[in-house]
Amino acid sequence: MESCPSIKNILLLDSEGKRVAAKYYSDDWPTNSAKEAFEKAVYTKTLKTNARTEAEIGMFENNIVVYKFIQDLHFFVTGGEDENELILATVLQGFFDAVGILLRGNVEKKEALENLDLILLCMDEIIDGGIILETDANIIAGKVASNSMDSGASLSEQTISQALATAREHLTRSLLT
């Protein structure tokens, strides 16, 4: 009998291999130091690869790791050695695209840290207890955005960076039409 695909962890690291956001769904790494060691080792192993245009897949410590980089952020999804790589890659792409939507295309460490709550909510919308819930980036971003702020919030209720991003979007739209 086949079981439901499961994820062991989902990681977002910076360009130095330090944790920006991470969720673990497996007891394979029982302590925080074990988790940090895994993150550093996975980062070191994937550092010299070119995973900027499309996701790369690798085996690491009897786990399948699917990863992709953008700017100074490194996205990782880890599954067991028997997991389907395409499913892991779909989860990674959903996470990657949802973060891009939520950060309004400005996917870099500074912006990610300023919106860490959105990224953590994004992880929660994709995976719950290792079980994949959703992989469609638009649905994930929509759920996160509706949970984090009223879509009809006035500019006075938004942070300065959100207001500037909103203004930039409106200007871009008006220039393109």
Image (tube, rainbow, N blue to C red):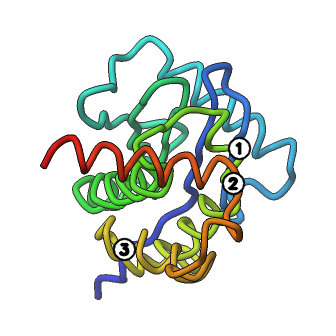
**Marking on residue 113:** 1
**Marking on residue 5:** 3
Q: Which element is circle 3 on? A: loop
Counting residues from the N terminus, which is met first, the one under dot 3 or under dot 2? Answer: 3
| Residue type at tag 2 | Leu
Q: How many C-alpha atoms fall within 10 Å of the one at disc 2: few (<14), some, or many (≥20)?
A: some
| Residue type at tag 3 | Pro
| Residue type at tag 1 | Leu
Q: Is residue 6 left or right of residue 124?
A: left
Quarter holding the N terminus? Answer: bottom left
Q: Quadrant of residue 23?
A: bottom right
Q: Which element is circle 2 on? A: helix
Residue 116: image x %, image y %? 69, 54
**Marking on residue 116:** 2
Looking at the image, which residue is at 43% across and 69% down?
141
Cα separation, mark 1 vs mark 2, equals: 5 Å
Counting residues from the N terminus, which is met first, the one under dot 1 or under dot 3? Answer: 3
Q: Is residue 3 left or right of residue 31?
A: left
Cα separation, mark 1 vs mark 3, equals: 30 Å
Residue 75: image x %, image y %? 49, 41
Q: Residue furthest bottom?
A: 1
Looking at the image, which residue is at 33% across and 26% down?
51
Compare residues 76 and 96 and report the one nearer the observer: 96
* Up/down of 74 relative to 92, above or below: above
**In front: label 1 or label 3:** 1
* Up/down of 128 relative to 85, above or below: below
Q: Quadrant of residue 18?
A: top right
Cα separation, mark 3 vs mark 2, equals: 27 Å
Compare residues 140 and 34 and report the one nearer the observer: 140
